[in-house]
Amino acid sequence: MDSEGPLAELLQFFKVLSDANRLKVVGLLSQEPSSVEQLAAMLNLSSSTVSHHLSRLSEAGLVAARAEGYYSVYHLQTDRLEQMARRILSRQDLPAVAQQADPAAYDRKVLRDFSLPDGHLKSIPAQRKKLDVVLRHVVLRFPVGKRHSEKQINLLLRRFHDDTATLRRELVGAGLLRRAQGQYWRPAD
């Protein structure tokens, strides 16, 4: 399946089901097969409007018709609906729809918002998610495993912000720095 496959199929599936009247048609057909006229009467819509919705649902493979006398009777393809939902929303295929996204964009935005050009922080974020971004950025300046005294850590942290106690406490609390016997170090994950 090409990279546009899961996304295109997911978009079609949700577009078809994103209309309230189409959802009502699906709900009614899930109870019993019906003609265009029956559906139009139950939904208080014109026959042409119902035909349009049935056409869209049919294109997506969600409904099918069979001739009964002068009328076409539509029925829901429940197996197809369930199969599409399972396949489109599967844990294996769903991540493929986000291939074009940039997971690091949020981190870059937070760092831009909270940092001065020299790398010093304007402020320490109060929101946890933003604070975590800043802490992950700060800890990268520490070599893995190298032990530092509190005084040395404070000198390194002062490059980022004058409130070294808060940064130090938050780094330890987040597990990004370890502390024992007055020594601090960045663990090897």
Image (cartoon, rainbow, N blue to C red):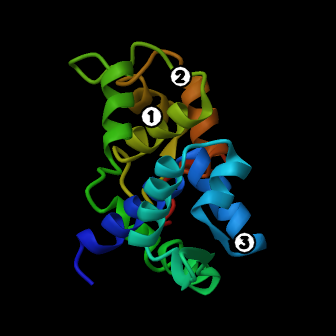
Within-10-Å neighbours for mark 3: few <14, some 14–19, many 20+? some
Indicate which label's residue lies in the foreground, 3 or 1.
3
Whether residue 108 sits left or right of residue 61 in the image: it is left
Q: Tag on residue 134?
A: 1
Whether residue 133 sits left or right of residue 22 in the image: it is left
Q: Residue at x 40, y 38 (%)?
A: 138
Disc 3 is placed on an element classified as helix
Residue type at mark 1 is Val
Residue with the mark numbered 2: 125
User: Does label 2 or label 3 sit earlier along the sequence?
Assistant: 3
Q: Tag on residue 30?
A: 3
- Report how far apart the C-alphas of labels 2 and 1 lie in the structure: 8 Å
| 32, above or below 172, in the image | below
Q: Is residue 69 visible?
A: yes
Mark 2 in CB contact with mark 1 (< 8 angstroms): yes
Q: Where in the figure is residue 109, as x and y percent of width and height?
A: 33, 30
Indicate which label's residue lies in the foreground, 2 or 3.
3
Whether residue 142 sits left or right of residue 29 in the image: it is left
| 102, above or below 125, in the image | below
